[in-house]
Amino acid sequence: MGEDTLWSNIFKKEIKKDENIYSVLKRVPIFQDLSWRELRYVERILHRRTYKENEIIFNEGEPGVGMYIIESGSVYIKLGRAQKVLAVLSKGDFFGEMALLLDSPRTASAVAGSPLKMLGFFQPDLFSLMETRPQTGNKILRRLAQMIAERLRQTSLENNAMKQKLAQYEEKTEKVT
């Protein structure tokens, strides 16, 4: 019975680990349409990364190579020389997904806000997945396109709202002068 208990505990730890990665991946929009089997395959091609607090993940202006999914810890997304914090991300959040499609420089910096464990999904891995498992690759690309389109739509709405506020402000200042 002692051996059964030992083996049972080993397997329970492994299952718990898999459930955590599975649940983290399932919350990332680009992986939401994938089956359990497809997620297991994607999990095998992900790259594990760890960072210490305040360690730089990437700098603004560096070439983007892929996206990151936070397993534990936090990340500060910072902009410009002043390193203004744009966002604080934590477990289950992801960032850098535009680099899966674009070969362009990063538009912000990412810095570990605490000890950090992440999963990296890089452009060469996506392209390889598209060749070896086109159905899975297409599901990811479709969700990525939907996500980018939604962000573009939101940005357009925000831009229009800012234009309206600017026009109202200009009208007020013209009346005063």
Image: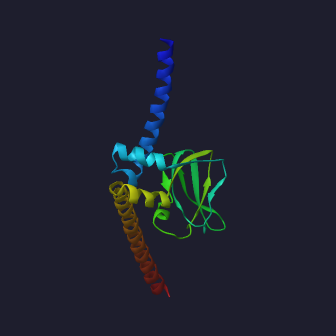
Q: Would residue 51 be found to the left or right of residue 10 on screen?
A: right
In the rendered image, residue 142, in percent from the top left (x then y), is placed at 34, 61
Residue 67 visible: yes
Colouring scheme applied when the structure was drawn: rainbow
Q: Identify whether 151 is placed above or below 14.
A: below
Q: How many marks?
A: 0
Quarter of image, res 87: bottom right
Residue 68 vs residue 114, the one in the foreground: 68
Q: Residue at x 38, y 70 (%)?
A: 157
Q: Identify whether 54 is placed above or below 109.
A: above
Q: Residue at x 46, y 82 (%)?
A: 170
Q: Residue at x 35, y 54 (%)?
A: 136
In the rendered image, residue 77, in percent from the top left (x then y), is placed at 57, 58
Quarter of image, res 19: top left
Q: Furthest residue to the front?
A: 132
Q: Residue at x 45, y 66 (%)?
A: 101
Q: Furthest residue to the top?
A: 1
In the rendered image, residue 153, in percent from the top left (x then y), is placed at 37, 68
Q: Identify whether 157 is placed above or below 127.
A: below
Residue 88 vs residue 163, the one in the foreground: 88
Residue 110 vs residue 117, the one in the foreground: 117
Residue 92 visible: no
In the rendered image, residue 78, in percent from the top left (x then y), is placed at 60, 61
